[in-house]
Amino acid sequence: MRGLLAGLGAALALGPSTARADATYEMLLRTEDRLVGGTVELEERIVVSVKGDRLRQEATGSRAVVTRRGARYTKPGRSLTLDQLDRGRRFEIDPDTGTYVEQAFADVRRRREAELSAAEKALGIDSAEASPALPVSVDRTGERLQVHGRHCERVVLSSTREAVVVAGRGAPEAQATPARFAMTFDLCLAPDVPAVAEARALEERIGDLTGARGPALDRALRVFAHRRDVFAVFELMHRLLEREQQRLGGVALRWERVFTGPRRGAFQETLVREQGELTRIEAGSLDARAFDLPPTLSPAGRSVGR
């Protein structure tokens, strides 16, 4: 069955191209992650471009790690991903080393399906089990804001979940009783912008072919719901709130996503905070050479994607 799905994905990917206008958007992201023992801080500038059936995602930024003792280590980094829907292939490029990894969408999908099957078997998950859900509160605040000259409406999504977590990432000691976790999406939503909608539509089609969406995502949600570590609670809540955001439509011009829960004896602390905004949205002709693999690069032995 997995082979049939992968073959179907490859056939779709290599089918006729869909006419799309060239489009680019740029975002700034700041993330603070305390799920580990210390704190990881990420600052990224990400540029996403679309030309025809090809998608380019370029990220530059820095990663800082603050240990429990207060020591701080910072490392800059760059990455570039080229998705070629017309060829059914992905190139993950490390500009610093001049190397790349090439993967077929069908191979990415097969690997994800194999990982899901192994997790389902280990956790005893029934394939007929319903996909997990969360009660989500949607607060349309009525606030009208402006982000880089574009008008948007502030909307707040929030949800909570209780779970018994075991020792592991974000939980140095096993919990005997359920712990309460909460997640909030504070968004400033604008009507759909054509340039962003072009990129989103292509990202979704690629996600279907690589197994990042649809039935494979439902399987991943069931795995997260069965696991008993804090990271799985975060992933489950984050993805379900993302689904709710998608139902609202439009595009988020600015956002803050916050995940809270117990940490080091405290009842509620911020475990993850992501702040972002769209700084540039453009439509216009792009150079096709930017969507091809540069001839100066050499193959690498392992994945180097962001």
Image (cartoon, rainbow, N blue to C red):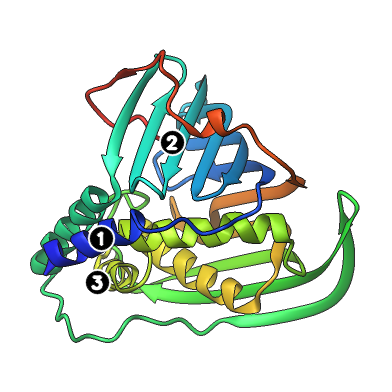
Residue for point 55% across, 67% down: 183
The residue tagged 3 is 226
Mark 1 or mark 2: whose residue is earlier in sequence: 1
Badge 1: residue crowd in 10 Å (few <14, some 14–19, many ≥20): some
Three-letter amino acid code at the position of disc 1: Val
Q: Are marks 1 and 3 in contact (CB under 8 Å)?
A: no
Q: Residue furthest front?
A: 16
40 up-or-down from 104: above or below: above
Residue 52 lies, in percent from the top left, at 55, 49
Q: Which of 301 and 235 lies nearest the eye of the viewer?
A: 301
The kind of residue tagged 2 is Arg
Distance from the alpha carbon under mark 1 to that under mark 3:
12 Å
Frontmost of labels 1 and 2 is 2
How far apart are the alpha carbons under marks 2 and 3? 27 Å
Residue in view at x 44 percent, y 61 percent: 205
Q: Amino acid at mark 3?
A: His
Report, in whole angstroms, how far the alpha carbon at label 1 lies from the one at label 2: 29 Å
Would you identify the image quadrant in which residue 9 lies? bottom left
Q: Nearer the viewer, mark 2 or mark 3?
A: 2
Q: Residue at x 52, y 28 (%)?
A: 63
Question: Where residue 259 sits in the image (x, y, percent)?
Answer: 53, 60
Q: Quadrant of the N terminus?
A: bottom left
Q: Specify which label sits upstream in the sequence, 2 or 3.
A: 3
Q: Is residue 139 left or right of residue 93?
A: right
Give the residue at mark 1: 166
Q: Label 2's element?
A: loop
Dot 3: what SS? helix
Closest to the observer: 132 or 89? 89
Looking at the image, is mark 1 or mark 3 earlier in the sequence? 1
Q: Which numbered tag is attached to residue 306?
A: 2
Report whether 103 appears left or right of 123.
right
